[in-house]
Image: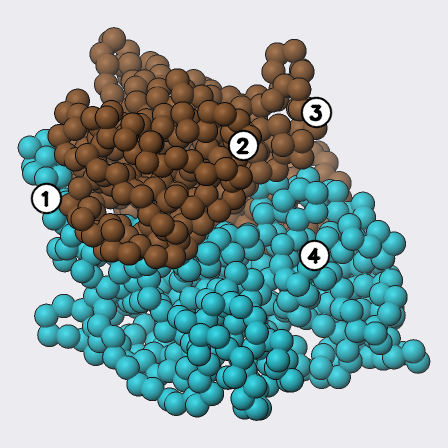
Chain colours: A brown, B cyan
């Protein structure tokens, strides 16, 4: 690397407001100047209050600031950084107080450690190239897994940011009811999106068969095609479609099957669909408002296009997405009957049709529905086996209810538990059309924030657990936003998984025994960490 | 293709420079506005924030954390963080106690925003948070919110004691109305919502009976880490009722839409109170539970064990002999009217569209939805999209009822929209 190409100046505060003894800064600065890394050393008196114009000589050079965290809080660094017209890449701060003095308090080697720390940080600064402003390097593509509505939206949105995208087509593997209801409402929309993706210069569609294996590599992911070809990706966007669980009753249809029947008009006409149609929503499982909306759209369609007698049995009315209340009204006007039932229903299949008995919540009387030809029970949505397999191969964690994101708020909207992998669309949770569109926008922002050089993490900065202090109270496992803390193989001590940890520091802050330390100041690890950064 | 991308990359540093000279105006410094401002400032863009309150953070900064031994994802800490980042950032400037009055399109690019300001007596830029003024104020008019400086509320009677003690001379009791004009390339509207006021309907007895409070009142107690009202008159609050859907899902009394947040905050607050005072008895009157988060099912199952859920929407609240609120409701099991007395009734009031929605819509060329929320007029494809004139973006609870986490997501989307818009201009 081009070491010492530019002169590096160092500015350190000599106040040490906290520590007992004073350091001999003159000695230190002589040593630093001898190291041929630094061209200038400026020692500030009370850096947190007054600069005395000493820093004016540093204009246009790379500057390393060393001081206490109070300076960072007071915004002084940032002000200085603007006053001196520094670029972001030419500026580095070292938190001397917590990393040197607090760690080594009372020990002899404070000066030695400070020297090492400053030299190491100076090394980073010297090696640092100007930041690249684009999100991803042009040779590093993004891989979007899933070609449903959310996958296509995300891909098109990324392509608009001039990021080349490959899409793994998952069509046919699973079709979510939301997707099908969109086809019903706006037949041309999804094909239009696919068309746009095919036409776009920077988007390539790959069939799912081509996908053999994806492994994390250096600075990205390596994707092996079935033929053995390799392709590198900078980031992966996990946007699979969700598929619906089968209806719980024998002979009943779930929404996906119903939409398939609606799609092939014949099945509805040829007598297979006589008599009443009954929808049971929220049966046994808690289904969210999005599935409600899809089911009610199907009911409305049946009523209006086929003049079917439609009844909807509800346990809970879900109204919390916009437009759903209006949909209920439309249905009532079209002649669909809504019945709210109390907790349980009795369903019997008598060959010719279903008999359903339950208690009406409004009147507390029993109702009986006999001989219904069609019984439709929407199920919860889950990830398809292929998508699960893909997630497992990447160590991407799947949480409750098959969502690929934890409900922790300490993350950006589209982050997953793995660095470099983002989650978009219904994999985050069931979504309606509007939510998916918003999600594609926030995905771009998350990418920007996390993949910029400043967002890169340093591998060696993962938490270190003190074996003697750890009481295995599992606080860290509970609080970790990324699920990175686990017990070690012998169940004696907690440890962080290197692959998932983000060095966010939550565990260290929460640990009641103070057994976790994030920034290990061992010289070797610091240097190797910096190599990762530089 | 690669070549053109490379060229673009070489230009990008200049592009960054060009971006820095641009200003984006954010109307409303609630959680959405602050998130937009912070994320744009991270990208090196100057941001100017206007808010009608004398402090940033809007409504959500006045809420309190509801975590018991585990975090319940209420998101209040996100707001505190946003305020802290806002304080630190040097690229963000703000004008508090101000409202936008007019928007003029400039000939080349961008807008001029006319802003009316009635400045707070304490200048937030010079306040050092020493707290001297608070100690001398005889009216207790000096207030603060978590993580921010002091401001003077309307209880001030201009006695001038604070003027004398302020060490930095930040106080000026003459409140002169000012008109200023700021240039901006793009405008983000995040004007937020108004909580429903149950006092409009006498049947709730809100305002007349101190034992009937709203969810927002309870939130402000949580903010000060008290979990129940501490008035000496209201002793021994042993039996508490939460009434959900007050002002939501009811066209006659309030708004038609579901407010999305009241189930969640009521359940979390009930859980917190139960944790703090295990011998309280809590009833929740609900229509349907609309809170459907990711870890909902386990939370719900656990809560059902501690708290009594009654499926009914109460008819009215009267007063019994001991002046306790008497909730009258129709029992679903036998369809009879019943009455139940409580020590405290919490009305989970919903989210209403902002009062000045029409005004904002007129100024910024936006449309009003049927419910009164703002919506983008054109460009229906993008929800964070622009209004009739390009470069105006909408985000947060002024669009539809949203929780804090949703507001943050929506704000990131709007910030991405602004960046794209500015990127095209450079």
Which quadrant does the C terminus of chain B fall into? Answer: bottom left
Q: Quadrant of residue A450?
A: top left
Report the mark closest to the observer, 2 or 4.
Answer: 2
How crowded pointer 3 is (Cα within 10 Å; few <14, some 14-19, many 20+) is rated as some
Report the mark closest to the observer, 3 or 2.
Answer: 2
Q: Tell me, yes or no, if residue B416 can be seen here.
A: no
Report the mark closest to the observer, 4 or 3.
Answer: 3
Left-right relation of A128 to A399: left
Residue at 22% across, 12% down: A229
Q: Position of residue B81 (x, y in %)?
A: 48, 53
Residue at 46% across, 34% down: A99
User: On the image, numbered disc 1 is attached to which residue?
Assistant: B11
Q: Position of residue B85 (x, y in %)?
A: 42, 54
How crowded pointer 1 is (Cα within 10 Å; few <14, some 14-19, many 20+) is rated as few
The answer to the question of whether label 1 and label 2 lie on touching residues, with beta carbons closer than 8 A, is no
User: On the image, numbered disc 2 is attached to which residue?
Assistant: A105
């Amino acid at each position: 690397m081009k070491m010492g190409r530019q002169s590096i100046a160092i500015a350190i505060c000599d106040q040490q407001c906290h520590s007992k003894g004073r350091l001999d800064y003159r000695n230190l600065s002589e040593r630093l100047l001898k190291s041929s890394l630094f061209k200038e050393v400026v020692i500030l008196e009370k850096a947190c209050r007054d600069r005395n114009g000493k820093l004016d000589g540093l204009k246009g050079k790379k500057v390393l600031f060393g001081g206490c965290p109070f300076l960072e809080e007071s915004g002084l660094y940032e002000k200085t950084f603007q006053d001196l017209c520094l670029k972001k890449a030419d500026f580095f701060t070292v938190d001397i107080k917590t990393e040197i003095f607090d760690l080594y308090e009372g020990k002899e080697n404070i000066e030695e450690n400070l020297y090492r720390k400053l030299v190491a940080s100076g090394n980073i600064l010297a090696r640092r190239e100007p930041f690249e402003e684009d999100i991803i390097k042009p040779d590093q593509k993004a891989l979007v897994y899933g070609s449903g509505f959310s996958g296509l939206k995300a891909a098109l949105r990324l392509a608009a940011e001039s990021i080349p995208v490959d899409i793994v087509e998952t069509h046919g593997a699973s079709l979510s009811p939301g997707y099908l209801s969109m086809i019903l409402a706006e037949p041309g929309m999804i094909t239009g999106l696919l068309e746009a993706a095919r036409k776009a210069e920077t988007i390539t569609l790959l069939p799912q068969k081509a996908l053999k294996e994806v492994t994390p590599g250096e600075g990205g992911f390596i994707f092996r095609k079935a033929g053995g070809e390799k392709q590198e990706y900078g980031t992966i966007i996990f946007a699979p479609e969700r598929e619906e669980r089968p209806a719980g009753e024998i002979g009943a249809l779930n929404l996906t099957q119903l939409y398939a029947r609606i799609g092939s008009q014949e099945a509805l006409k040829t007598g297979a669909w006589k008599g009443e149609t009954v929808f049971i929503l929220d049966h046994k499982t808690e289904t969210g408002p999005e599935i409600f909306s899809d089911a009610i759209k199907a009911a409305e369609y049946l009523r209006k296009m086929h003049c079917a007698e439609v009844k909807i049995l509800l346990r809970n009315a879900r109204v919390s997405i916009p437009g759903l209340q209006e949909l209920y009204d439309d249905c009532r006007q079209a002649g669909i009957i809504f019945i709210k039932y109390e907790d349980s229903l009795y369903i019997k299949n008598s060959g010719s049709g279903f008999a359903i008995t339950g208690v009406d919540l409004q009147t507390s009387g029993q109702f009986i529905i006999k001989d219904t030809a069609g019984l439709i029970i929407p199920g919860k949505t889950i990830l398809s086996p292929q998508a699960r397999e893909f997630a497992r191969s990447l160590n991407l964690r799947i949480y409750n209810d098959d969502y690929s994101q934890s409900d922790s708020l300490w993350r950006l909207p589209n982050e997953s538990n793995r660095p470099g992998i983002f989650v978009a669309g219904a994999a985050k949770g069931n979504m309606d059309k509007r939510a998916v569109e918003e999600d594609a926008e926030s995905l771009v922002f998350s990418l920007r924030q996390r993949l910029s050089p400043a967002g890169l993490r340093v591998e060696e900065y993962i938490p270190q657990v003190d074996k003697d202090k750890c009481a295995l109270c599992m606080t860290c496992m509970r609080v970790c936003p990324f699920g990175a803390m686990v017990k070690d193989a012998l169940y004696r001590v907690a440890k962080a998984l290197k692959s998932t940890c983000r060095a966010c520091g939550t565990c260290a802050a929460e640990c009641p025994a103070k057994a976790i330390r994030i920034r290990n100041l061992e010289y070797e690890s610091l240097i190797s960490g910096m190599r990762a950064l530089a | 293709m690669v070549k053109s991308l490379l060229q673009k990359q070489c230009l990008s540093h200049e592009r960054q420079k060009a971006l820095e000279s641009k200003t984006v105006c954010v109307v409303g410094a609630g959680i959405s506005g602050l998130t937009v401002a912070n994320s744009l400032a991270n990208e090196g863009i100057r941001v100017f924030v206007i808010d009608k309150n004398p402090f940033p953070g809007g409504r959500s900064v006045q809420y309190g954390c509801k975590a018991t031994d585990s975090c319940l994802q209420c998101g209040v800490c996100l707001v505190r963080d946003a305020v802290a980042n806002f304080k630190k950032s040097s690229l963000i400037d703000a004008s508090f106690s101000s409202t936008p009055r007019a928007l003029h399109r400039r000939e080349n690019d961008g807008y001029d925003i006319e802003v009316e300001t009635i400045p707070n007596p304490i200048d937030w830029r010079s306040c050092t948070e020493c707290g001297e003024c608070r100690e001398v104020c005889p009216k207790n008019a000096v207030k603060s919110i978590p993580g921010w400086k002091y401001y003077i509320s309307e209880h001030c009677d201009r006695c001038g004691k604070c003027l004398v003690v302020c060490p930095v001379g930040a106080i000026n009791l003459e409140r002169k109305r000012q008109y200023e004009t700021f240039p901006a390339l793009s405008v983000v509207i995040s004007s937020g919502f108004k909580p429903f006021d149950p006092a409009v309907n006498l049947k709730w007895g809100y305002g007349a009976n101190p034992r009937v409070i709203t969810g927002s009142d309870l939130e402000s107690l949580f903010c000060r880490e008290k979990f129940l009202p501490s008035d000496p008159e209201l002793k021994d609050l042993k039996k508490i009722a939460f009434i959900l859907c007050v002002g939501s899902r009811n066209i006659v009394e309030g708004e038609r839409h579901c407010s999305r947040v009241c189930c969640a905050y009521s359940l979390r607050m009930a859980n917190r109170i139960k944790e703090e005072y295990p011998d309280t008895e809590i009833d929740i009157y609900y229509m349907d539970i609309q809170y459907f988060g990711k870890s909902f099912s386990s939370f719900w199952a656990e809560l059902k064990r501690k708290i009594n859920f009654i499926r009914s929407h109460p008819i009215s609240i009267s007063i019994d002999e001991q002046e306790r609120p008497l909730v009258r409701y129709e029992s679903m099991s036998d369809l009879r009217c019943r009455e139940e007395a409580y020590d405290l009734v919490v009305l989970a009031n919903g989210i209403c569209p902002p009062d000045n929605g029409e005004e904002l819509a007129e100024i910024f060329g936006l449309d009003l939805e049927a419910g009164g929320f703002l919506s983008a007029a054109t460009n229906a494809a993008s929800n964070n999209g622009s209004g009739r004139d390009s470069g105006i973006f909408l985000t947060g609870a002024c669009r539809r009822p949203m929780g804090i986490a949703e507001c943050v997501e929506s704000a990131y989307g709007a910030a991405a929209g602004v960046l794209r818009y500015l990127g095209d201009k450079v």
